[in-house]
Amino acid sequence: MKATALLNAALDELLERIRPVLALVSNGRRGAGAGVLAGDGLVLTNLHVVGRAHTVQVLLEDGSRYDAPVIARDPHVDLALLQIPANGHPAAVFSSSRPRPGELVYAFGHPWGQRNVLTGGVLSAVTSLRGWHGEVPVLRADVQLAPGNSGGPLLNASGEVIGLNAMIFGGDQSVAIPASLIQSFLAGARKNQRMQAAL
């Protein structure tokens, strides 16, 4: 009983930490997905969530709504970056540790339009899938996902983002883009922003 209470308290703390950095992202045509606040007004999501739209709608946990331009895209890893006013919004913490198969993981998103749903499971493999432009590193887990989870975070037990949920593969296996690729994508986008600002 004591162990159950401790686990519930830990999950409550995880939810309180991650809820403010989760966004609802809609391109106005095909429903909605999720996004993660990455600092400086940047919102990270999947490219397939925004599609070909140049501007999408972003709704935050505090009720703020924004028309957010898509400022970076990478079809190779299915990532897109949106810009909203910084306004002191909190930012997710991305893990710098290598994910380990067998560790507990949690997916957070908006499946079937339900806001802020948490599902848990086990990280099954750190592997790769063949995409349009070659092999892409991915995390596979048995967390339950549905439409609306795309673009939401895959978390470790500490509440750090270890990946961005992208799709379901092989029936019951979810696929997430690992934090290492996300950090590279963010670094490239921020560099381009600085270069454009200097022009």
Image (spheres, helix red, strand yellow):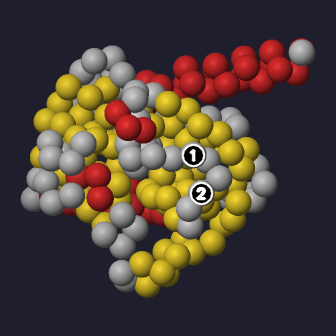
In the picture, the quarter occupied by the C terminus is: bottom left
Q: Is residue 120 above or below residue 138?
A: above
In the drawing, what numbered circle is on residue 11? none
Residue highlighted by disc 2: 172
Residue found farthest to the front: 171
As measured in the structure, the alpha-carbon distance from the residue carrying label 1 to the one carrying label 2 is 7 Å
**Residue pictured at 59% horizontal, 37% vertical:** 119
x, y percent for residue 175: 53, 60
Q: How many marks?
A: 2
Q: Is residue 62 left or right of residue 52?
A: right
**What residue do we see at 36% from left, 64% from top?**
78
- Amino acid on which disc 2 is placed: Asp
Question: Crowding at label 2, few (<14), some or many (≥20) Cα neighbours within 10 Å?
Answer: few
Amino acid type, callout 1: Gln
| Residue placed under numbered mark 1 in the picture | 144
Front one among 125 and 38: 125
- Does residue 120 appear left or right of residue 94 in this picture? right
Question: Could you tell me which quadrant the N terminus lies in?
Answer: top right
x, y (%) of residue 146? Answer: 45, 46
Does the rendering let one see residue 180? no
The earlier-in-sequence mark between 1 and 2 is 1
Which element is circle 2 on? loop
Q: What residue lies at 38% left-to-right and 42% top-to-bottom?
A: 148
Picture coordinates of residue 114, whole percent (x, y)? 40, 29
Against 60, residue 187 (above or below) is below
Residue at (35%, 49%) from the top-left corner? 45
